[in-house]
Amino acid sequence: MTRLQTREAVIGYGGAPIVRGVDVDIPDGRITAIVGPNGCGKSTLLRALVRLLSPSSGTVLLDGEDIHRVPTREVARRVGLLPQSPIAPAGITVKELVARGRTPHQKVLRPWSAQDETAVMSALHSTALTDIQDVVVDELSGGQRQRAWIAMTLAQDTPLMILDEPTTYLDIAHQYDVMDLLHRLNTRQERTIVMVVHDLHQAARYAHHVIAMRDGVVAAAGAPGDVLTEELIRDVFSLEARVLTDPVTGTPLVVPAHGPGGAR
Amino acid sequence: MRILRIGPLGITTHRRTFAVGLVMLAALAALVIFALVQGQSGITVLDSLKAAVGIPVGAPADFIVGQVRAPRALTAVLVGAMLGVAGAVLQSLTRNPLASPDFIGISMGAGTGAVLTIWLVGATSLWVTAAGAVVGALTTAALILALSWRRGIVPLRLILAGIGMGFVAQAVTQYALTRMDVHDAGNALGWLVGSVTGRTWTHVSVAAAVLAILLPVVLWHARSLRTMEMGDDAARALGIPVGSSRAVLAVCSVLLAAGAVAVTGPIGFIALVAPALALRATRSAGVTLLPSALMGALLLLAADQLSQLMPATLQFPVGVFTAVVGAPYLLWLVWRASRGGPS
């Protein structure tokens, strides 16, 4: 089953299209990783999946309906997005930031409800931020800050969560922290997660479904073991690579086939 | 985050914001009363208050308080509030503390519109001048947007284009002044300084009407405004119609600034300073509209009262006074920005 899909979607910013006719199906209740070299159109595709961009032709379907026919607020109740570089208002506390995630559920002149409070507290709990909920976001470490933003997206309480490079700018421990968190959200809360990631190792370990893009089209899509092959890495990233087996998880482990300076 | 809920309408606010708002409201009430009773006319406090609300108490008080002090104080309160909200909205939309309508040329544009109206139509009625100011402000805002637009609003370009447009607007104003009838030019010049002196109940009605129409619209979009501070993508993903909300809010901000200029002439720095002070007082994360309005009202009324307490030779119009106080704040902002601190 898939609630979110594209059909022959051509997407761009007015000039030449960046995504050139892609059919993508996001499997429900799974983690999907979109990978590809810089400029391949993966972030553009992601933006179209949350309706930040509209395809110049083709469609993005949410629950079978053209996403542009669905009201803005309704989209925001079904699909949550963590953008690449969101701005935390100066002086905002963790809980206040997380509470902003409730925006699509609120109306002018409608007070903060018990349901809002429950969603915020549960988001803080899932991201282990309960103890520091009153700390100002500017004072957090990079990893904590990213968890706070993920908590905001969680409080939005959408079945689909879309994250644009959630681990960029984090050190390695915090990167895996975030990935483990996404894995827990997926398994325990059955949230469908779509993320753009640069690290193929993370994609292989954490995603059930990998979409590899090159030059604005989908080069391959499927289980990590089927997609992340030596041929595909050469084809998509122009990199000679060896694909080993991750000794911990048994998933594909991609390493360049050349040593430093190009030595074999 | 401690949240306070008020009444069946369900206005949600932080306790601290609410408390600070109450304090500002009390201070404003006290300052209004002070403005009504202060002065050398031998009118008792009680008579002043009665005259202010329209209870006849005899010749001098009915005129001095009822027709001079009360409309002057109310004009200051309403225009201060308009400037406070106009500045708060613009600073929030551009995410820049320098973007206030008086700093990016919109107030100058409103002034140009008003002066051109006085030149071409004559200073017939305040409503006509106000309409001229609105046309001038909207034209200037449209030109600034056209000059700075690059697939969206680029805050720094907007501010630079605004400063440039401000100079253009001033040049047009100067030209109009040289071509005008001397009597009209005198009127226009006096008005261009920015003052609440000699304002009547007509001025109060214009200001009240503008505020009564625009403030609810702005408040209705307050949540959108706050959410857009997190970036356009984040706001859209949270279900905010970014394009239309931003357009409505920008137009409201320009109209509020234009209305303020129409009533009192351009009064600088209130729109720049009031939102920043309101933020500091409430320690709120992101824009606070009503505290900005209250802060603007307090600042303008206080500035006018202070200028009246000066010895006669130093009784500048309030526009000069706010510039003297506001300029150091602007320099401080620039100094902080140049040190790379948070702005």
Image (spheres, rainbow, N blue to C red):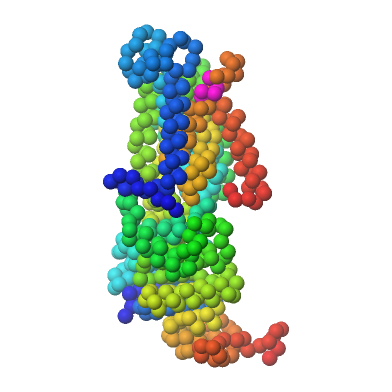
Magenta highlight on residue B306: yes
Q: Is residue A65 left or right of residue B170?
A: left
Asked where in the image residue B306 lies, by quadrant, the reply is: top right
Q: Main secondary structure of the magenta part?
A: helix
User: Does the magenta-highlighted stretch encompass residue B194?
Assistant: no
**Residue A240 location (% of width, % of height):** 60, 87
- Callout count: 0
Task: Place residue A173 in its image quadrant.
Answer: bottom right
Q: Is residue B228 visible to the viewer in this orientation of the structure?
A: no
Extent of the magenta region: B304-308
Left or right relative to A221: residue B276:
right
Q: Quadrant of residue B290?
A: top left
Q: Pick out the residue farthest to the top.
A: B59
Q: Which residue occupies 36% across, 30% down?
A: B208
Q: Along the line of sight, which residue is nearer the eye, B225 or B113?
A: B225
Residue occupying image coordinates x 37% and y 33%: B210
Q: Is residue B295 visible?
A: yes
Image coords of residue A116 (percent x, y): 35, 59
Residue B333, horizontal then vertical, whole percent: 61, 43
Please determine whether, in this image, residue B133 is positioned above or below residue B65.
Answer: below
Q: Nearer the viewer, residue B270 or B114?
A: B270
Front in this rendered view, residue B126 or A136? A136
In the figure, A123 relative to B137: above or below? below
In percent of width and height, residue A165 lies at 51, 71
Q: Residue at x 37, y 74 (%)?
A: A189
Q: Nearer the viewer, residue B38 or B230?
A: B38
Q: Is residue B225 above or below residue A42?
A: above
Q: Residue at x 45, y 58 (%)?
A: A95
